[in-house]
Image (cartoon, helix red, strand yellow):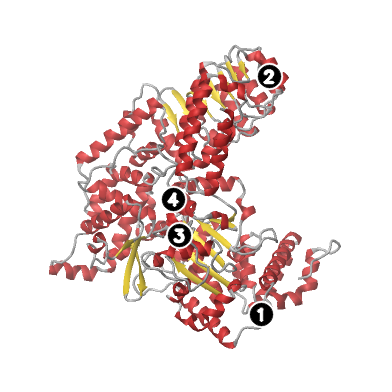
Amino acid sequence: MVENDGCNSCLTALGALRVSLVDELEGRIDSLLEILVCREVFTRDDREEVLCQLGPRARVRKVLDILTCKGEEAAKVFLSISSHQQEAQTHSHEGNTDQPQSVEYNKVKQKHKDVLTRRSESMLFYNTRHGEKILFSEHYVNLLLADGHQGLEIKRHEVLTFGQKRLSMQQKSVVQRKIAPAELFSRVNGNRPVKKVLVSGVAGIGKTILVQKMLFDFGGNRDHLGFDFIVHMTFRDLNLIDKPTNFRELVLRKNRHLAKELDNILANDDKLLIILDGFDEFRHYRSCDVDAFVTEPDEDAEVVEVFGSLMQGELLPNASVMLTSRPAAINYIPVGCIDRFVLIAGFSLTEVQDFFFRYFQDSVISECMFAVVSANELMLTLCYIPAFCYIVCCILKESEDLCGESPETMTDIYVQYLVALLRSHTQARAETFRQEREAGTVQPLSDIVLKLGRLAFQKLMEHQTLFYGSDRDVAALEGCSLVSTFLDKTVAQEPGCTEEVYSFAHLTVQEFFAAVYCAMTDHPLPDALQHGAGVAEGSNNGHLDLFNRFLSGILSERNANLLSRQVGLCCHKDKVDNYRQRLIGELTMRCESGAHILNHLHCLFEQQDPSLALAVQPERLQVNVSDETLSQMDYNAIKYFLDLTKGQIAELDLTGTGVSCEALRDIQHLLLRCNRLWLGENNIDMKTAQVIADLLQVSDSITHLGLGWSDIGDDELLALSSAIRVKRNLQELWMEGNRVSYKGLLSLSDLTPNPLKKVVAIWNDLTDTDTELFCIQESITVSFSDDEMWGAWGEWVFKRCEVSSNEKLVTVLHKVCNISVHCLATQWAKTFYKQLSQLIKHRIECCTEEDMSKKLKRFERILNHIQ
């Protein structure tokens, strides 16, 4: 590729290079086209227009024609992408001074591509009928991949956390970090080579589909041509190996056709890509940071040691490795060896539409169904996850009356999913059911559903998503044709044995069936809906969040009646009444104590029974939803509860929730009822500050406002001070850790001590002279003292630290460890920082992630030094 100089436009360069570009790009036009769509240079319609052309050379010409119409900027991006592709190919050949490979090597190489094409050409949907073949090329929908480390905190259920992360990514313009599958092993910043790639994503987001896409493209010579061979392994298969093995044996288990040339393949490991899919399903995933290595492909060791050696570069150091995993397991990966982190962010809205079209295979029907989903905020939100998108399509396909009864909650959706698939299954096997009924051998659907529920419940409590044919609960389902409707089955073959491995179509489907079993049988209800204790140690990482929500929704009157009519499942009235009373009691207790309440609000929302909210009568209404980035579904649950309650809201804690000016406007009618409003640790820009100012000008209730560590400066404070003068109701303003200077604080001087009895402004942009000046004013606090209010402040911060993830804890430590030694002479400070040191020590002992452990140890040293 010839780089255009500053004198010539990119469009001119395209015209001059047109003939050579056709020759140069015909071998990689498909991957180039995919990158253009990913970068939003081309639309989906542009791509279809190109793909309609016969032959690769015609496709290149069509791409160039479209670029000419799109203009200079599009041509510039195209030339940049094409240039990087060429550099990547050049880099892949660097240092390769070997003689051309033998004829036999090339024959095996083509044979392997043919095998991969055959294995990946069909896409198996979750309940595909036996023998049904759905072509991958016709049903694959592009996934949004984000380049860069996008760690998901494990404080909440991963699917719920995904909703928060997606919101955060949208706010940060994730488009700037989009990456196409073809670019996964491209050099970082054009320099550092990428050998190890970690692809993470929540359950059902498309990790295995991405792997299939790569195998499909490689087999068809469409992409990843810098490699001679791609070897694909799943951790489901590796789980079945219970004796020492070696890498050669692992490759040959499902690739016997490579045997003759395997020595050459391994000797040219710089041309080898190894894909390891489903690390979170590995039985030994907690113990992969090994210190016993193998260095030769023929050296026997335990599977976990072979894997660890491969990841750490001790075995086949020049090979490229791609690892996929759910977020829950990535802390156990030795991340020091990872060169690129990639997050699968699911579908964009365009891809959701594309999925509907490919699923229904009719543009009129798909547009109608998409319109139904677009009108339902909950369903549309879920459709960004591909597996959810499939579940919603199943419901739409089988439920003719959905338009008149649109689901309002998560449980509604899954109850309709269960009923829809049962209806489809019974209709498809109507004749078989008639024969079984006449023979007296038919099992009631309710019995089969409860057997599936028992399996789901037992394995959920054991944190297992894979079940083997030898399991007792799986054996109880033998001979039941309905099982294939809800369970995926794979057959793992070992020399001398065959093992059937089962899993539910999606993690949330397992949680739903588990909740059905718990609700519809004599099994006791689980303990209280705990939230917060022991987060960092893993005792509560949101593992049962959705299970609890499903349980609440199933025990609601409307869903219980639907399951009774359609499936023959009946809830015990005593269990329903007991659950409702317990939910009311726990909500009341948490409102009075100010304990974290979000999960309970979701359980209340699933019930959709206003009488339950009205029965919650706390003496003092405190709503604490802090330290979790709130999604729209979270706000819906909060509004549902507070809209049904009456009177003053004593306290609403939105600290560290990622609140925006739009969200504040949406709940403004609730904020007007608040006495104490805490909005700290959110990025409050001028637009958001103005919303708060508008609130202060009309509220007769707000007396305490918290804006600590919210990045406000003098301009934002001036807007707030002007608003405070209107109603003069605000008594306390907490704004520690911001950018406020002497000028900003001066704007509050005429508001103290009336109405502002207390202004806390420690850790702001004040000089020593400024601090001395304001120390004279009792109402404005700019440094620590022995005042009892700091003891209360320390208790509040420490309680938050106790229930925070390690990642959140480090964020808090950055803020509170900026303290001078003389401040530690106060009793409250001694107590606070001693407790903090003990907490950090405990977290270090339990921490399994090396990088996080180093961060915690750094703060441990800081606190040891200043105490």
Counting residues from the N terminus, which is met first, the one under dot 2 or under dot 3? 3
Q: CA distance from mark 1 to mark 4?
A: 56 Å
Provide the secondary structure element on which disc 2 rests: helix
**Residue 455 horizontal/vertical position (percent):** 28, 56
Q: CA distance from mark 2 to mark 3?
A: 54 Å
Looking at the rendered image, the disc whose residue lies closer to the viewer, 3 or 1, is 1
Q: Please indicate whether residue 284 sits to the left or right of residue 19 in the image.
A: left
What is the secondary structure assignment of the residue under circle 4?
helix
Q: Position of residue 6 (x, y in %)?
A: 84, 61
Q: Judge depth for marks 2 and 1 and give the one in front.
A: 1
Mark 2 and mark 4 lie on one chain; the one further toward the N terminus is: 4
Measure how far apart labels 2 and 4 are at the Cα level.
53 Å
User: Is 11 located above or below residue 735 in the figure?
Assistant: below
Instruction: Decide which of tag 1 and tag 4 comes sooner along the chain.
Output: 1
- Residue picked out by circle 2: 771
Q: Front-most of 732 and 606?
A: 732
Label 4 and label 3: CA atoms lie apart by: 29 Å
Name the residue rendered at 71%, 76% in the picture. 24
In this picture, is 648 found above or below 183? above
Q: Which amino acid type is marked by label 4?
A: Met
| SS type, badge 3 | helix
